[in-house]
Image (cartoon, rainbow, N blue to C red):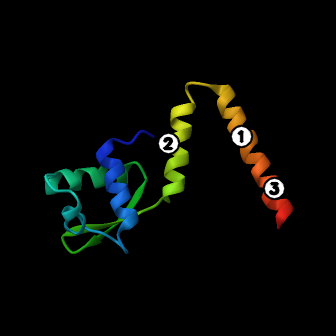
Amino acid sequence: MRLGPLERRVLDALWHHAGDARVRDLQGSFPGIAYTTLMTTLDRLHRKGLVERRADGRAFAYRSRVSPSQAVLSYLLEEVGPLDAGTLDALEELVRARRRELEGGA
């Protein structure tokens, strides 16, 4: 799933915000970006399944559904996937080796 630059920035802002965040809570981190643009971006992230939202009065409060490491892995797989099946095989082997290492150390 591809994320635009603003979507990535908004997701990052949610990771750094304590608890649920409303558009107005995040707006100070986005000078020059309209309230409605942030609202639309959060809605897109919600439709992509990356954030959850709940009604909070007349607005929504948002919270990330993915951790930063999950987002990085997802982006990596998105970029590598269509380009090189061999690279995916190598990554899969690295993951298996790491799992064996962790299981052996437990």
How much space separates mark 2 and mark 3, taking CA atoms? 25 Å
- Circle 3 Cα neighbour tier, 10 Å, few/some/many (<14 / 14–19 / ≥20): few
Q: Quadrant of residue 87?
A: top right
Q: Residue at x 42, y 39 (%)?
A: 2
| Above or below 5: residue 101 | below
Amino acid type at mark 1:
Glu
Relative depth, front residue between 48 and 18: 18
Q: Residues within 10 Å of mark 2 (few under 14, many from 20)?
A: some
At 55% across and 26% down in the image, what residue appears?
A: 82
Instruction: Residue under label 3, please give it.
Output: 101
Q: Is residue 78 left or right of residue 30?
A: right
Q: Which residue is mark 1?
A: 92
The circle on residue 70 is none
Question: Which of the 4 quarters of the picture holds residue 25?
Answer: bottom left
Q: Give the quadrant of the N terminus.
A: top left
Kind of residue at disc 3: Glu
Outermost residue, right direction? 104
Asked if residue 97 lies left or right of residue 8, the reply is right
User: Helix or strand or loop: what does disc 1 sit on?
Assistant: helix
The residue that disc 2 covers is: 75
69 on left or right of 21: right
Q: Secondary structure at mark 2?
A: helix
Residue at x 56% of width, y 24% of height: 83
Q: Which amino acid, mark 2?
A: Tyr
Q: In terms of secondary structure, where does tag 3 sit?
A: helix
Q: CA distance from mark 1 to mark 3?
A: 14 Å
Percent of width and height locating residue 94: 73, 43
Examine the rendered structure and indicate whether residue 75 appears above or below residue 32: above
Residue occupying the point 71% across, 34% down: 90
